[in-house]
Image (cartoon, helix red, strand yellow):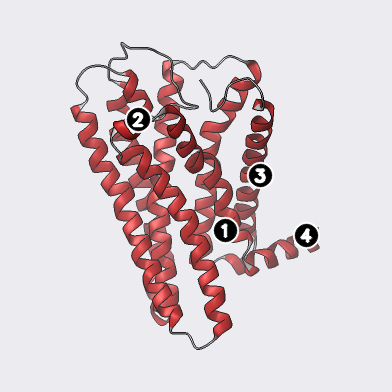
Amino acid sequence: MGLFTHGKGSGFFFGVICAIFFMAVIANGVMVFLINIDPHLHTPMYFLLSHLSLIDILYISTIVPKMLVDYLVGQGTISFIACTAQCFLYMGFMGAEFFLLGLMAYDRYVAICNPLHYPVLISQRVCCMILASSWFGGALDTFLLTPITMSLPFCASHQINHFFCEAPTMLRLACGDKTAYETVMYVCCVAMLLIPFSVVTASYTRILITVQQMTSAEGRKKAFATCSSHMTVVTLFYGTALYTYMLPQSYHTPIKDKVFSAFYTILTPLLNPLIYSLRNRDVMGALKRVVARC
């Protein structure tokens, strides 16, 4: 049924989402390009950020183009196979990002709180392990949840009151015993959401404690500003996902589900490169060097 219906103001919302989509793809694409082409950015932190940008491109491209095309043609339909594919891809990319953000917070904790041990604790080999574990976690999540979700009998309405094939929304259309799904979903959410979010919270708490002990007032101010912006984006991403996947169905309404899902599927892929990277002096320096060469 889409994020919004044809009516007053729908053209404005369409334009806003179009702009967010293209800005997110361009910003993340620029990040991947700069990090790969500039030797100054060949560090563990930027290596992980480039893969975060890649996941964001794939993630938003799984959902938004289909929604925009449906609005333009005025016919919101999707086949069962396409719905299964969309569900499979978005859960895999989302799961990978959940784990990656948690491990990136640990990377920042080591860099700020244990800088002398950083080259040993976050080596190239460790970075590859972090990346592989993130993708493995996302793959495990989607290979568990997608078959269970899409194998349920959909004997109720086939009208999906959402803007993509999100697993909890699909579950409401299904009939039969959903116990297996709910059990697996609970385990996956604890592993995918609560554990990485706990790592993020613990890492940034330790970072803030370390920053508080800095002698430079200007350094403290910059560090607090950076940490607070990071925590805002991470809380937005994890918080909206926790609402979607962990709150009981009695707390959900179609409007709330669409709004919360829009935050972590549409808005977060735009905010990540802006908050994590494009405000960074090293990244802006790399961008200027590339422009100067052209």
Quadrant of the image containing the C terminus: bottom right
Mark 2 nearby-residue class (10 Å; few <14, some 14–19, many ≥20): some
- Name the residue type under label 3: Met
The residue indicated by pointer 3 is 23
The answer to which of marks 1 and 2 sits earlier in the sequence is 2
Q: Which residue is mark 2?
A: 168
Q: Earlier in the sequence, mark 3 or mark 1?
A: 3
| Left or right: residue 126 compared with residue 20 | left
Instruction: Relative to 173, say whether 224 is above or below.
Output: below
Residue, disc 1: 275
Q: Earlier in the sequence, mark 3 or mark 2?
A: 3
Q: 42 or 258, which lies in front?
A: 258
Mark 1 and mark 4: Cα distance apart in space: 22 Å
Separation of disc 2 and disc 4 at Cα?
A: 45 Å
Judged from the image, the secondary structure of the residue bearing numbered disc 1 is: helix
Mark 1 belongs to which amino acid?
Ile
Tag 4 residue: 291
Q: Is disc 4 surrounded by few (<14), some (14 to 19) or many (20+) residues within 10 Å?
A: few
Residue 207 appears in the rendering: yes
Residue 168 is situated, as x and y percent measured from the top left of the image, at 35, 30
Which numbered disc flags the more N-terminal residue, 3 or 4?
3
Kindly identify the amino acid type of the residue bearing the numbered disc 4: Val
Within-10-Å neighbours for mark 3: few <14, some 14–19, many 20+: some
Which corner quadrant of the image does residue 144 belong to? top left
